[in-house]
Image (tube, rainbow, N blue to C red):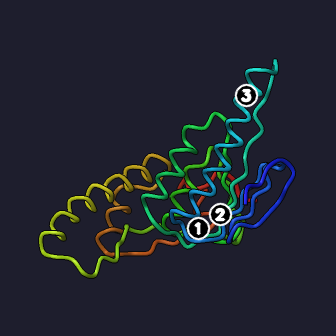
Amino acid sequence: MILRGDIMGNIDNIYIDCEQRIIYLSDIIDNITIGKITFFLLEIIKNDDRKEKKEIGFSREPIQLYINSCGGNICDMWSLITIIENSKTPIHTYCNGYAYSAACTIFVSGHRRFIGKHAELMYHQMSHSNKHTTYQDNFEYRKMYDKSQKELEKYILSKTKIKKNLVDKIRKNKIDYYIYAENAIKLGFADEII
């Protein structure tokens, strides 16, 4: 189902209103979910690009991305973050409930980040579930996972005020690090409590 203009709809647990420029993600971060979200983000952004070329003094209204997700696939997470970071149209992220793991990283990628006073974020080391692998597969995967973990940590450190020693502790001790509204402001995960 393609949603355009003033049409509203539900695709799985994604709610999109292109006219109001609102996307609500309430699902796992995977190829299907992120594919649908990025399709509509790109449609709105390209429409803004066309309007900017035609209309003198055109001002881009922010897109509101609401996140209520337990996380998911890191590759799909990076796909959405790349779109957000390269968008000339501001994309504001909102968390009123929870944004865990990959959803937390997407949340901090917003051009402005808003958190509800009862919301919670959760950051932790990345994980995977390859059960049936050979010794050599594990060796090769380890290199890939090391690179991915370093990229994740570098990104979180660049987008927040969290200290490297805390990020190291979270990884080494396998901690699920929960961040509530006031601490999210203090640690730079969010810009404003709503």
Residue named by callout 2: 67
Left-right relation of 98 to 170:
right
Q: Quadrant of residue 136?
A: bottom left
Q: Position of residue 187 (x, y in %)?
A: 53, 56
Q: In this view of the protein, which residue sits in the foreground, 100 or 25?
A: 25
Residue named by callout 3: 50
Q: Position of residue 15 (x, y in %)?
A: 74, 63
* Mark 3–mark 1 distance (CA, rounded to whole Å): 33 Å
Question: Could you tell which of marks 3 and 2 lies nearer the N-terminus?
Answer: 3
Three-letter code, disc 1: Ala
Please tell me how crowded label 2 is: few (under 14), some (14-19), or many (20+) other residues with Cα within 10 Å: many
Question: Could you tell which of marks 3 and 1 lies nearer the N-terminus?
Answer: 3
Left-right relation of 107 to 177:
right
Three-letter code, disc 3: Arg
* Mark 1–mark 2 distance (CA, rounded to whole Å): 6 Å
Q: In this view of the protein, which residue sits in the foreground, 96 or 65?
A: 65
Disc 1 and disc 2 in contact, CB within 8 angstroms: yes
Q: Position of residue 7 (x, y in %)?
A: 85, 55
Please tell me how crowded label 1 is: few (under 14), some (14-19), or many (20+) other residues with Cα within 10 Å: many
Question: At numbered mark 2, what does the secondary structure look like: helix, strand or loop?
Answer: strand
Single out the mark in the foreground, 3 or 1.
3
Q: Position of residue 76 (x, y in %)?
A: 48, 58
Q: Which mark is residue 99?
A: 1
Three-letter code, disc 2: Ile
Question: At numbered mark 3, what does the secondary structure look like: helix, strand or loop?
Answer: helix
